[in-house]
Amino acid sequence: MVTPASLTGLHFQILTDCVAMEANVDFHIQDEAERMLKEIDLVMKNVENSEFYAGMHLDLKQNETIQKHFFRLLGSHSHVQVVVYGLGSIEYSFHSQFHLAFVLLLKRDCSHWIDSIVIYDPNMSLADIIVFKKLDLEVLTIDENCKRRVQRPTMFYMPDPYCYHIGNLLGANWSSSCLNRICLLTNSFLDTLTDTPRSGPNLEAVIRLERILPFTTEIKIKLSDNTMYANLFSGFAWHFFDVDPNIDIDKPGWFWLDIQRNLEEEFLEDMKGNMTSEEFAEIWGIYRGFRRLRCNNVLPPPGWTKLNIYGIGREVDQPGQYGGIFQDENGTCLVRYRGVFDVEDNVIAGLEALRLGLARCVEGKPNVEKLIVESDDLTLVQYVNGRPEPNKKAMDKLKEISVLLEHITCATVHYIYEEANEAARKLALSDA
């Protein structure tokens, strides 16, 4: 038990202060907000007197390109609305205070084209919300995840977004009518594309950025010599979109096709590298891959051999059967094999087809260093890639397969659809 006697003087004071705050939480939050308002006022004066803001304000008044795009953005409207995403908490971050001060000054000094500010950040505190409301900002209570679809000319201010947040915003407005109503002040698209891998949670954003870039005018913010402002606004740029309404940018299916192409490119890059069998198993145990691989007899990449396997268990008038076909990167059939196997389970029959194929590789018939195995039995593929826990019979087969795999430099097992595995199926079911 903690007693006052067991605490140091400092710890005791902290505990006492916490108890006092708990007794009057509302007062402390309100007091914090009042003090933060004074801080924001001081920060606004700092930003207003900075060389950075002076240059920015001058650009807005004199840069013909910016003025032309704002004039086109407004159209028949008199003002734009500003939406702020990703500000952070002004209670806990001075950087957030500077970004807020910047957008407040923009509204004050550009009141002829900015009429309101909407703000949201998942990290905003109760004190933050009080401050925002006192500053006449509209505070969103629901996380839009940066997916607001615009209905009027809108400027989005995103001080430090993740790449996928930009992708969410673009995706929610993926039509010429919406994109042409948007001005985006955030990290440079060009820099983002350079720095962001084309994979994982950022894939959609990267593809959208690549698609929209030809229709984007990007104007980088001029930075001052002041280190703080240079760090705060490094890489910032205005982004204006001018998408021809006759260009079917939101054509159904285009994004799906881009994802498929990207998955195929990633697959080919992986095949060129030095990944291990275990690393491939981790990937293919989680990801389904691209559709063309599942639907078609795709030739293996250079340096790889492909083995298509098929197995079916015993039925009333038919014994269990299996088959396998090896082919090289040119599509040449290297080896074919088939046989019967007294088992009822399709998966076990398929695993036997795989075991016998791997045994041939170990014997050098054919000589294989890197092997792609394809099967239309999803359970088999998941078992080999270490996913669902197999039954005892399957486990025994997998142990044999694991030993054989140790003799192959690299092997990867993929799931394909029945039509892509037709040759192996026909072979297994033939009487030859």
Image (cartoon, rainbow, N blue to C red):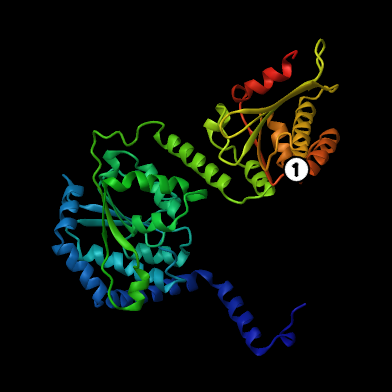
Task: Note whether 176 is above or below 102 in the view shown.
Answer: above
The image shows residue 22 at horizontal and vertical percentages of 58, 72
In the picture, which quadrant includes the N terminus? bottom right
Q: Nearer the viewer, residue 420 or 356?
A: 356
Q: Quadrant of residue 37?
A: bottom left
User: Which residue extends farthest top?
Assistant: 317
Residue 372 visible? The answer is yes
Left or right, 269 with respect to 6, comes to left
The image shows residue 98 at horizontal and vertical percentages of 35, 71
Which residue matches tag 1? 405
Q: Quadrant of residue 14?
A: bottom right
The image shows residue 35 at horizontal and vertical percentages of 40, 76
Residue at the spot x=17%, y=50% of the render? 78
Residue at the spot x=30%, y=64% of the render? 103
Left or right, 412 with respect to 257, comes to right
Left or right, 71 with respect to 361, comes to left
In the picture, which quadrant includes the C terminus? top right
Left or right, 67 with respect to 390, comes to left
Q: Quadrant of residue 131?
A: bottom left
Q: Nearer the viewer, residue 406 or 175?
A: 406
Q: Nearer the viewer, residue 397 or 37?
A: 397
Q: For the residue carrying disc 1, how many other residues have a C-alpha within 10 Å: few (<14), some (14-19), or many (20+)?
A: many
Residue 324 visible? The answer is no
Q: Amino acid at mark 1?
A: Leu
Q: Nearer the viewer, residue 192 or 320?
A: 320
The image shows residue 242 at horizontal and vertical percentages of 23, 45
Q: How many marks?
A: 1
Task: Note whether 8 is above or below 396 in the view shown.
Answer: below
Residue at the spot x=73%, y=43% of the render? 386
**Secondary structure state at the residue bearing disc 1:** helix
